[in-house]
Image (cartoon, rainbow, N blue to C red):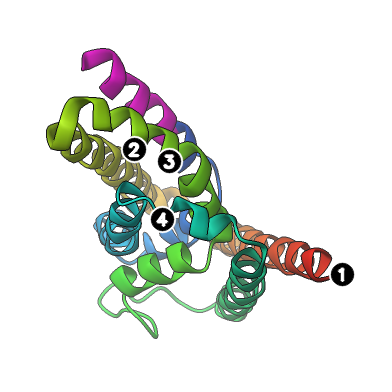
Amino acid sequence: MIPFLSSVAVISLSGVMMPGPMFAVTVARSYRSQTAGLKMALGHAIVEVPLMLLIYFGLARFFNQEPVQVALYLVGGSILVWMGISMFRKRGRPVDEGRETRYNSVVAGVITSAANPLFFLWWAAVGSMLVMKSLSFGLTGFILLITVHLACDFGWLFFISTVVYRTKAMWQEKFRVGLLTACSLLLIGFGGWFLSSGIRLLV
């Protein structure tokens, strides 16, 4: 059991620590709240736990169907481009720590997870392998898989938001604007990549 859970932790951290849409939004929102990472992780879990249950019951093949992948790429890419453009437009505005933006960080976690086709494809491939291995330990193994994986998500995103929130006073305004610009371009870049991938699958 210990070697299995160790592999879950390593594989999970390798995924969550990779810069992507959720990382970009977490950094941007951590200016307002130190708990932004926890809220983002909660929103992520709202999408992820049902997905893990679907895979547990044998529905991983659904996400490997080409029409499903096309829909994930096109819809998800469009949403991420929209989020990136919105963030870019607001990059120079003063930070209001007591006010959330158009939607709170939990909702942002849901959106960035549901709009990321790589998230679903990762679970259909790598994630399904972990779920299958957990079955050898019965229901306990699957529950521990969920627990360890979510602990990695919550721990890493909370670490990011804590670092950003506690060090922001040392950053100059130009650096803050530059970082938000980079995060917005990261979202737009991922969105554009997903859109082009979906279009290639269509043709």
Residue 181 marker: none
Q: Secondary structure at mark 1?
A: loop
Say if residue 172 shows up in the picture.
no
User: Residue 147 at x, y = what percent?
Assistant: 19, 40
Q: CA distance from mark 2 to mark 1?
A: 33 Å
Front residue of 75 and 190: 75
Identify the residue at image location x=39%, y=86%. Answer: 102
**Amino acid type of the residue tagged 1 in the rendering:** Val
Q: Please state which of the two labelled residues, at mark 3 or mark 4, is closer to the viewer.
A: 4
Residue 127 circle label: 3
Looking at the picture, which amino acid does disc 4 mark?
A: Leu
Separation of marks 3 and 2 at Cα, in angstroms: 6 Å
Residue topped by disc 4? 59
Q: Nearer the viewer, mark 2 or mark 4?
A: 4
Dot 1, how many residues are within 10 Å of its Cα: few (below 14), some (14-19), or many (20+)? few
Give whichever of discs 3 and 4 has the lower sequence position: 4
Q: Quadrant of the C terminus?
A: bottom right
Tell me the distance, in whole angstroms, between the alpha carbons under discs 3 and 1: 29 Å
The residue mark sitting in front, 4 or 1, is 4
Type of amino acid at the residue the image marks with label 3: Gly
N-terminal-most mark, 2 or 4: 4
User: Label 1 belongs to which residue?
Assistant: 203
Task: Describe the element under mark 3 as helix, strand or loop.
Answer: helix
How much space separates mark 3 and mark 4, taking CA atoms? 12 Å
In the image, which residues are magenta? 1-13
Give yes or no for contact between labels 3 and 4 (Cβ–Cβ under 8 Å).
no
Q: Left or right: 195 with respect to 127? A: right
Q: Residue sitting at 36 percent across and 59 percent down?
A: 30
Instruction: Let me know if residue 171 appears in the view.
Output: yes
